[in-house]
Amino acid sequence: MVLSFSTPWAVVQLVVVLGLVSSAAAAGGAAVRRQGGYQHPPLPDKTLWPGPWEAYIAAPENKSHIEPARFWKARGNITVPLAHGGGGNLFEEGKEGGKGGLLFGAGGVLTLEFDENIAGRVCLDVSGIGSNGKGVVVLQLAYSESSWFAGPVPDATTDRQERDLPLDFEVSGEGTVCVGKEFVRGAFKYLTISLPYRRKQEENEEKGWKGMGQKVLGMMTGTTSTRDEGWVRIASVWVNCTAFPSQKNGRAYTGYFYSSNDLLNRIWYAGAWTLQLSTLDPKEGSALIDYNRLIDHNKSPIGSWYSNFTISNGSAVTTDGAKRDRMVWPGDMYIAVPGIAVSTNDMDAVRNALEVLYANQYADGSLPYAGPPMGFHGEFSDTYHLHTLLGTYNYVLFSDDLNWLRDRWDEYLRALRVSISKVDELGLLHVSSTADWLRPGMTGHNLEATAILYTVLSKTKVLAEWIDVDVSEDIKEWDALQKTLEEGLARLYCPDTGLFSDNVGRRGFGGDERVDPQDGNSWALISKMNLSSSGLPWKDPKSDHRSRHPLPEGPPTPRNISANLRSRWTAFGAPATEFPNVISPFASGFELLAHCAADEIDVAVELMLLEWGYLLKGDGFTGSTLAEGFRVDGHPQYPAYWSTARNSQAHGWSSGPTGVLTGEVLGIELTLPGGRGVWIHHHMTKWLRWMRGGYATDSARIEVKEWRCAEWAFDATTGTKQDTGGRAVILEVIVTPVRSAQSITVRVGDAFTAQEYTTSGGTTLWVTWEDDKTTLQRIDFTAKVTARHGGGDLDGEDWFNNTVVNLDNGSELVYDEDFVLPDMEHRAPGMVDWDAMELHFKTPPPEGWKIDRLKEVGNMDWDIGK
């Protein structure tokens, strides 16, 4: 028997089907449209790349039955049997003990820990109950991603009070009881089950308690009561995970990454797992109950939580985060879509996200700031508007869904014209919205928005070529506009820092709030804008005239900007200077791409190890998923929110390294949609001895192996093979078309050494010498490669150590066991600007959005000395 339950909260289900909403408040939404485009094949049931790297996959073997790994902490009237992992700790006996299972009496509290940050509906197998004639015993559930908030009160999805309300869980008899579908919790590593003491509702009111949590749930500040609450014996606890609905087997990855650095491997798979948890059943969306109220008029109390808002069509959709906001945010897509493509290839989830944004396009061509429940009250962001267009490019690149693009082309161009129209006489995009990724200061002639527009223009030309539409006249306009933007960019250049400022006003060069932003400078490099114009400064940022004298040091170069960004790093990563006190893995994801665009791959990998390594090793994080952000001093508070508990610990926008490691470090770049054309621009970073990885598209499977080798040759004097001192990097490329008789165009090498060939499948081998990186030598794989240890597996776990490449001069290349990895540079932690922190939090919330800090609720957490 399986039972579901709901709470006394007023839960309203809102169904959004693209532009149509089942609420009178949303009248005038866009009409429902067909889901055109290519139908992607089902995702595989088994991994396409079996190997030792599967040990890093966090997804469970059975997503419908995930059990906790251990008891984390217990208190009060509870029995935890030694045989069930009690670890020798005896807790106070319940009222009817000795029968096995977890026995809860009134006042009993138990926190369970899972191995990974997970998601889903909690179920209990109840083996006994004593309700004292009342027919029901009410447990409470509290969820937390971080150990810092593991206890009787959950962490937070709300922004109206410090913590969410615990969830009442009614038990009326033996059997399996599960929370209702709407109470799926999007991410948690810790589950706390308690049987609290309660008083009658009238007693609560007599006490004068004001908190809604106490009014609704009867929570007490004391720890004793004369009332008998009964008891419950629980045989087992498990979770039915409803995330990544497209995958029957969450471990069936379509891509992989594996290297000599354990931490980099963990980072890649943490990004993939974060993206899986953030991919939802569209009917389980939006954790923003208070914002939902603008559409569904729910009257759910402050601090309540549930996820039953339908946010898109289809059966799966990619969102911003697992716990919250569980919405389609286009700003995340430039980071998230490549990560999805190289790990699970859940392109249907990406398309469904884009569909709902285009379906709610405003009458003037603007695209909504986010998907439902936003998009019905004019919510708009200049940068996120452009991110939808970038998401369109990445979706088509990885999916080959050209028919879908043709169906959306007119809407795409309408949206592009909105941004083009905002470029004025200063040659910069003048934003009309302050909304961005919650960073302050998004005003005026903005650097980030300008550079993103430049990027979109470049990619629009490519999209037009792919679907063979005539935009010859438009291209003339776009080319001219890009030159205008390059001239405008020079207004923002600051020779004293070698970086660009945020705008031409108060946050610009000479402004009283000068900021050289991480996001904008990163986008200046990603965009590949010509920086030479910045060598001839304007007399002032708003002047009509240029200086007569070029800068003595000349114009900035991409490598200059990369170095200047790196110089600002602290012990825990790259600060987002545009947002005081913040380290943002989102903005740092763009910085990764910026260093790669500057051909500084080593710097990008160093930042991954520094910042994302801390996300996996730092106190207060999950160790398996990637958090939304944190403070510059390493504290897990994300300063966008006053409540530390609200930080999303599984946020798709933080998954940048997953796509960057595959696309830039391994160097697997698609040049034609779906992998019909591939460019392998490999780079063996100084942080690795060997690496391998690959992924599958609907057209091809592409795999790359790369390892460091030493040259050995026969020495006639000694009669033995000796190390000649020569050092090389070997690149092995394996391309397999999915369809028979299909050819894939492959380009290997950098812009100077690249060689191109067409293949119907097979392996090629390439050698680059450390002392001559301008030459890329192709080796006959069949004739020149042998096993070092005689008959060993050239594709086994020790492949790099077992492969011998025999050169024409009689020497051989074998794995370089003596290569020395560099040490990480020591850096000091960042310093928190508390005045700036308070100033940010003093920004008033929207009208009617009262904030309760739950000060009257006791026993929120275990006393763990945070």
Image: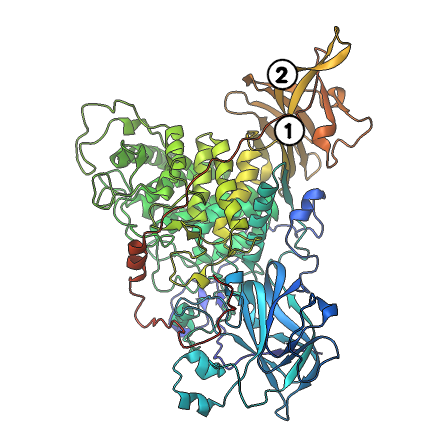
Front one among 552 and 377: 552
Front one among 845 and 42: 845
Q: Residue at x 40, y 65 (%)?
A: 29
Q: Reply above or below: 488 against 39.
A: above
Badge 1: few (under 14), some or many (20 or more) residues near its Cα, within 10 Å?
many
Q: Is residue 309 left or right of residue 70?
A: left
Q: Position of residue 572 (x, y in %)?
A: 45, 45
Q: Is residue 134 visible in the rendered structure shown here?
A: yes
Q: Which residue lies furthest to the bottom in this view?
A: 133
Q: Which residue is drawn at 36% across and 27% down?
A: 557
Q: Is residue 475 left or right of residue 40?
A: left
Q: Of helix, strand and loop, which one carries label 1?
A: strand
Front one among 573 and 168: 573
Q: Of helix, strand and loop, which one carries label 2?
A: strand
Q: Name the amino acid type tagged 1.
A: Trp
Q: Reply above or below: 675 against 417.
A: above
Q: Name the amino acid type tagged 2.
A: Gly
Q: Is residue 469 visible in the rendered structure shown here?
A: no
The residue mark sitting in front, 1 or 2, is 2
Dots 1, 2 in contact, CB < 8 A:
no
Q: Position of residue 169 (x, y in %)?
A: 58, 78
Front one among 75 and 729: 75
Q: Residue at x 41, y 91 (%)?
A: 206
Q: Is residue 523 left or right of residue 677?
A: left
Q: Which residue has dot 1 on it?
A: 707
Q: Where is residue 642 in the image (x, y as percent from the top left)?
A: 37, 62
Q: What distance separates the C-alpha of mark 1 from that of mark 2?
A: 14 Å
Res 105 quadrant in image: bottom right
Q: Residue 726 carries which label?
A: 2
Q: Position of residue 357 (x, y in %)?
A: 44, 56
Q: Is residue 233 left or right of residue 524?
A: right
Q: Tell me how the rendering is colored.
A: rainbow
